[in-house]
Image (cartoon, rainbow, N blue to C red):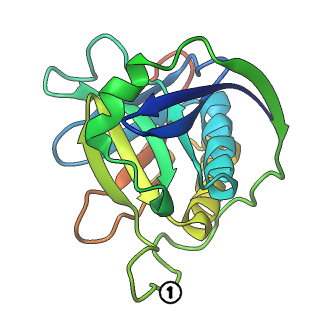
Amino acid sequence: MKLRLIVHEARSGRESFRVVRPARPPAHAELLDDSWYLNAYLDREAALLMAGLWTLAASSPRTLVHLPLRTAGGRTPGDRALDLVLLHHSLRFPPAHWKRLRARLGPGRPRTVDLRPPEPREEPDGAYPRHADDRDRFHQHIHAETLFLTGSAPLFRRNAGLFRDVALRGPAHPRTAARHGHYCREVDCGVRFRGLHVQYADPDGVSPAAG
């Protein structure tokens, strides 16, 4: 799995941080905050990109992985479009500093990385054991129109397979399915935070209504 990226270096206070973005943001993807859920609508290309970025976050604990996803408006007047940042808990980056750091990023430099594709995650969501320190659940914050998901390397690696599953199974899923008319998975964030509902969306309609 090859990822074409833009790598940025910028300072926040006394510290320097590396921020990585896709060289080309996905054309058909949204991340929306509807107050009850965090909803990601992705076509196949966007879901594969997400799988790659989550794999990258698992192997790059000193990096903020940033995916610009904001669009004009949302699915309904009450929805808020968000960007996404993935970061390892050991980085200890305060989300409150993001807006200032983002403004200092500059053009960056291109880079291509070759990652091993994650296996599609087929076990039920939340079927893995919890760690005593709860690092196996994402901690989340929303700041400066950006959702921050902070977790451990194994957690990012496991959920990368969830996105690949959406990319591989979503396009063939019939809209007349008995339970619902869309293919979706959920990133479990435990009882303290809302789950991230990940739904396959056709390229000609990023946010299809549930059947």
**Residue placed under numbered mark 1 in the picture:** 129
- The answer, for residue 92, to whether it is visible in the render is yes
Horizontal and vertical percent position of residue 210: 35, 38
Closest to the observer, 204 or 144: 144
Q: Amino acid at mark 1?
A: Pro
**How dense is the environment of label 1, judged by Cα within 10 Å: few (below 14), some, or many (20 and up)?**
few
Task: Answer above or below: position of 18 versus 25.
Answer: below
Relative horizontal placement of residue 195, taking residue 1 as reference (left or right): left
Quadrant containing the N terminus is top right
Residue 143, image x, y percentages:
25, 36
Q: Is residue 164 visible?
A: no
Residue closest to the eye, 110 or 25: 110
Q: Position of residue 25 (x, y in %)?
A: 59, 20
Residue 9 spot, x, y in % from top left: 58, 28
Residue at figure coordinates x 66%, y 52% from the top left: 60
Quadrant position of residue 146: top left
Q: Quadrant of residue 187?
A: bottom left
Q: Nearer the viewer, residue 185 or 69?
A: 69
